[in-house]
Image (cartoon, rainbow, N blue to C red):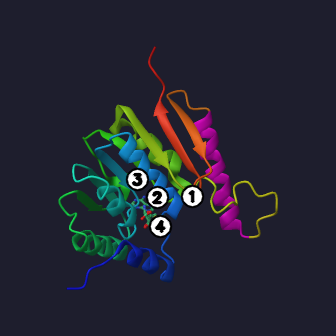
């Protein structure tokens, strides 16, 4: 029987240029889940299922709902989830996250999808967060480009950097949430609801 290893997913992602979480980013995330006894997770952006599988493997009581809009990646993620035997713990939805309506509330919402849409993801899914829950956003440094002083040649990249900076400002000035920014992996934001009193 051929068994897939986590390293195989990392190698596959590297070979086919699929952006998955960086090693220290995923280590921080799984540690956060463990320390804070997170049990229900909503992930926006599954890719091939790497981070969903890593999060599910933290504890058999964890359930992850993850959304992916790319059909090929969705299929690969389904296959990988089966290979790791975590299909009872992961619900994967093949859809654009903006078309998905969820009634459930989660301990953790992990935003790791189209960087240009982060404000919209945050606004759409914050209602699905439990009162004491956390929203974690990845890629806030965008390979170091967010802080670079050098001129970025590509117009697309410049636009993305502008969008990420707009998201950072949105988080910094947010009246409902307080965000801690950590220079881990590709830059992570940890947002928690401000206390009501
Ligand atoms: N979380 C994954 C991991 O670390 O293993 C990596 C996710 S990858 C950075 C981002 C994924 O989000 C891509 O596969 C992309 O197709 C998906 N995506 C982007 N925008 C989306 C949307 N609006 N709805 C659903 N999926 C989306």
Q: Position of residue 98 (x, y in %)?
A: 38, 53
Q: Are marks 1 and 2 in contact (CB under 8 Å)?
A: yes
Q: Nearer the viewer, residue 136 or 99?
A: 136
Q: Quadrant of the N terminus?
A: bottom left
Q: Is residue 115 above or below residue 177?
A: below
Q: Is residue 74 above or below residue 170?
A: below
Residue at 62%, 52% in the rendered image: 163
Q: Nearer the viewer, residue 49 or 75?
A: 49
Q: Using the numbered discs, state the Cα–Cα distance from disc 1 to disc 2 in whole angstroms.
A: 8 Å
Q: Position of residue 4 (x, y in %)?
A: 30, 78
Q: Using the numbered discs, state the Cα–Cα distance from disc 1 to disc 3 in whole angstroms.
A: 13 Å
- How many numbered markers are drawn? 4
Is residue 166 on the magenta stretch? Answer: yes
Q: Does the Cβ of the disc 4 residue fall within 8 Å of ligand 1?
A: yes
Q: Position of residue 139 (x, y in %)?
A: 56, 56
Q: Which residue is mark 3?
A: 30
Q: Which residue is mark 4?
A: 20
Q: Tell me which numbered mark, 3 or 4, is placed earlier along the sequence.
A: 4
Badge 4 marks a residue whose secondary structure is loop
Residues in magenta, as a range:
154-172
- Judged by its main secondary structure, the magenta piece is helix
Q: Are marks 2 and 3 in contact (CB under 8 Å)?
A: yes
Q: Which residue is mark 1?
A: 185
Q: Tell me which numbered mark, 1 or 3, is placed earlier along the sequence.
A: 3
Q: Does the Cβ of the disc 2 residue fall within 8 Å of ligand 1?
A: yes
Q: Tell me which numbered mark, 1 or 4, is placed earlier along the sequence.
A: 4
């Amino acid at each position: 029987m051929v068994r897939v290893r986590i390293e195989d997913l990392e190698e596959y992602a590297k070979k086919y240029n699929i952006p998955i979480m960086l090693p220290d980013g995923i280590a921080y995330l799984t540690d956060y889940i463990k320390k804070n006894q997170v049990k229900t997770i909503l992930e926006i952006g599954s890719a091939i299922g790497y981070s969903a599988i890593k999060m599910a493997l933290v504890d058999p009581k964890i359930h992850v709902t993850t959304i992916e809009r790319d059909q090929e990646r969705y299929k690969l993620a389904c296959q990988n989830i089966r290979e790791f035997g975590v299909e009872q713990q992961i619900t994967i939805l093949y859809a654009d996250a903006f078309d998905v309506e969820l009634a459930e509330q989660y301990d953790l919402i992990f935003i790791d999808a189209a960087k240009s849409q982060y404000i919209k993801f945050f606004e759409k899914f914050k209602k699905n967060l439990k009162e004491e829950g956390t929203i974690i956003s990845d890629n806030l440094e965008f390979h170091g480009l967010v802080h670079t002083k050098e001129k970025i040649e590509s117009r697309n990249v410049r636009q993305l950097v502008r969008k990420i900076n707009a998201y950072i400002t949105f988080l910094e000035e947010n009246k409902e949430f307080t965000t801690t920014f950590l220079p881990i992996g590709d830059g992570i934001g940890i947002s928690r609801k401000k206390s009501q009193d």
